[in-house]
Image: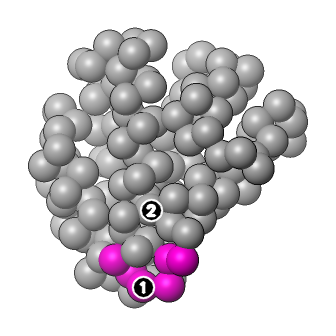
Amino acid sequence: MPSELVKRAIFHCARRGAEPGDLAEAVIGALRPLHAELTLVVGAQAASALFAHAVHRTRAAVGWTVPTAEVMADTMFDALRDDLANRTLTDGLSAGEFLLSTLVDHLVSLIGQPLTRRLLHSAWSAPDADYSSEESLQ
């Protein structure tokens, strides 16, 4: 599980994430560019389906009130952000990490570690992240 990679993406986007709202923005800040990069690779419909499935699995695991959607739209990002902002910092972090980790796991199973690593690097472009390490996706 690439939990370190996901944590770095969230914290890279959060900068100072001390409040649930900051964390919510960080998670959405990691999701939007990942969705955009994935859309370039597999198309909007397939990218949205992958996101919807990850949201569905996360919803079941963490008790999200966010309705599942067939198409990942700005309204879904807004609903996810609002839900995360209304949680405690610990619960929001757990839910955000679960969602991003689930999505990354889906990508690894579909396109493999090397391509997933490249996609994440392109989407998140964290200058201090080492996406070339085999350990980062295990």
Image: 11 above or below 86: above
- Side (left or right) of 77 relative to 126: left
Q: Secondary structure at mark 1?
A: loop
Q: Quadrant of residue 96?
A: bottom left
Q: Examine the residues drawn in magenta and state their main secondary structure.
A: loop
- Badge 1 crowding class, 10 Å Cα cut-off, few under 14, some 14 to 19, many 20 or more, is few
Image: 76 above or below 132: below
Q: Position of residue 97 (x, y in %)?
A: 53, 60
Q: Name which residue lies at 55% across and 69% down.
A: 15
Q: Which residues are magenta?
A: 16-21
User: Does the CB distance between marks 2 and 1 fall below 8 Å?
Assistant: no
Q: Which mark is residue 19?
A: 1
Let me know if residue 11 appears in the view.
yes
Q: Position of residue 88 (x, y in %)?
A: 39, 86
Q: Name which residue lies at 52% across and 34% down.
A: 123
Q: Position of residue 67 (x, y in %)?
A: 15, 54
Amino acid at pointer 1: Glu
Q: Which mark is residue 26?
A: 2
Question: What is the C-alpha distance between the residues marked 2 and 1?
Answer: 11 Å
Q: Secondary structure at mark 2?
A: helix
Q: Position of residue 92 (x, y in %)?
A: 42, 74
Q: Quadrant of the C terminus?
A: top right
Q: Name which residue lies at 50% across and 77% down.
A: 17
